Amino acid sequence: MNHIILIGFMGSGKTSVGHHLSEALSLPFLDTDEEIEKNSQMKITDIFSQYGERYFRNLETETLEKLSEDQDRKVISVGGGLPVEKVNQPYLKEMGSVIFLEAKEDTLVTRLQGDTTRPMLKGADLRERIRTLMAQRQEAYDKVADFHIQTDEKTFEEIIEEIVRKMHIGGYHEI
Ligand code: S3P
């Protein structure tokens, strides 16, 4: 399949880049977190607090399974933990080109400071939490990624141009 899939840590800009990219390429955009919230009629924080992380991970896999049957080409952004689950990795590889949006720890700290919507960042010192999670996840991100894009200090336009260039997508219009 031919989807364009954005992966990366929380705060790496998957959803925002996804919106811009879908507009630039005139493709529909879908975000797995939004899909889960829509289908369950619950906020992600409530899913975590009421049912726990494992339940949420199962919803992610169900969402991905459904999406893998969708032949309509799309830009898809997936939650930061989704590529880490081994069961999800073959789906991502099959579904299209996987783009890993990277950001430095400092950038992530700045972007995620004060965020209350991400249960995985609750509690502990934010920088420490980011560092620990990133160390656990880096290998999985690298494994499924076809392309890496460093996003620090780049505008959306620059990021999109880089994606289009790396993927050799022709005929897109500037936004
Ligand atoms: C998570 C990332 C979130 C969301 C959930 C868990 C994670 O998505 O899926 O809070 O484990 O990294 P974003 O990466 O879009 O913030």
Image (spheres, rainbow, N blue to C red):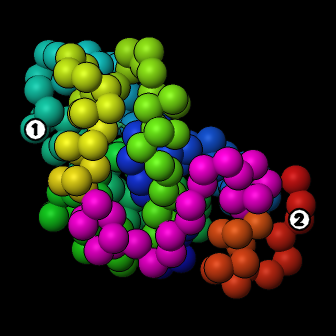
Q: Is residue 53 above or below residue 2?
A: above
Question: Is residue 115 visible from the viewing direction of this image?
Answer: yes
Does residue 71 appear left or right of residue 80 in this picture?
Answer: right
Residue pointed to by mark 2 = 173
Residue 111, given in percent of the width and then of the height, sits at 52, 30
Who's the residue at 29% across and 74% down the image? Answer: 143
Who's the residue at 24% across and 33% down the image? Answer: 129
Whether the residue under disc 2 has CB within 8 Å of ligand 1: no
Callout 1, which amino acid?
Arg
Toward which corner of the image does residue 120 lie, by quadrant?
Answer: top left
Q: CA distance from mark 1 to mark 2?
A: 41 Å
Residue 124, numbered circle: none
Residue pointed to by mark 1 = 54
- Is residue 136 inside the magenta stretch? no
Residue 109, given in percent of the width and then of the height, sits at 44, 32
**Residue range highlighted in magenta:** 138-160
Whether the residue under disc 1 has CB within 8 Å of ligand 1: no
Q: Residues within 10 Å of mark 2 (few under 14, many from 20)?
A: few
Toward which corner of the image does residue 13 lie, by quadrant?
Answer: top right
Question: Is residue 91 visible from the viewing direction of this image?
Answer: no
Residue 69, given in percent of the width and then of the height, sits at 38, 66
Residue 155, given in percent of the width and then of the height, sits at 75, 49
